[in-house]
Amino acid sequence: MRDLPKYQDEEPKPEFEDPTLYHYAIYSEIVIAVSVVMYSVVKNAKEPWKHVFHVVIDRKIVAAMKMYPDLHHIVLLDGDVEVQKDLTDLWNIDLDGKVNGAVESYFGSFHGYS
């Protein structure tokens, strides 16, 4: 059996740190679910080539988040969502100096949440 090259951390590609692109972080160990989220974002995007995904599947990859401070916005997506429209308008929301924002969850006719 031949020796496989050892894994080496590579420098992040420029697009991973480009604040002019639309960045999403997805934290999930379920790769199929993540692929559905990514597909639904790209499918509904007006400019799909401008979307960058940061997928964190375990603690070892958390070090990759060191680039987050260079970004102006990053949207956290759950691994169980299906996006149904273009999300780029989220980058136009003025957070008034706050570091995070949230959207209201839709629970259909269920009104018993607190």
Image: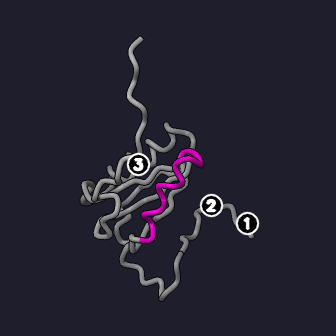
Label disc, if present, on residue 107 of the rendered structure: 2
Q: Mark 2, mark 3: which one is toward the viewer?
A: 3
Please name the residue that numbered disc 1 is placed on: 113
The amino acid pointed to by label 2 is Phe
| Amino acid type, label 3 | Met
Instruction: Give the left or right position of residue 26, taking residue 17 as reference.
Output: right
Few, some or many residues within 10 Å of mark 3 (<14, 14–19, 20+): many
Magenta span main SS: helix
The span shown in magenta is 57-69
Look at 47% across and 55% down and name the residue there.
64
Query: At which x and y percent is residue 87?
Result: 38, 64
Q: Which circle's residue, 2 or 1, is located before the other in the chain? A: 2
Q: Secondary structure at mark 3?
A: helix
Q: Kindly indicate whether the residue at mark 1 contacts the one at mark 2 (C-beta within 8 angstroms).
A: yes
Residue drawn at 52 percent across, 83 percent down: 98
Q: Is residue 3 above or below residue 62?
A: above
Q: Position of residue 71 (x, y in %)?
A: 39, 70
Residue found 45% across the figure and 71% down from its top: 69
The residue most toward the bottom is 96
Residue at mark 3: 38
| Quadrant containing the N terminus in the rendered view | top left
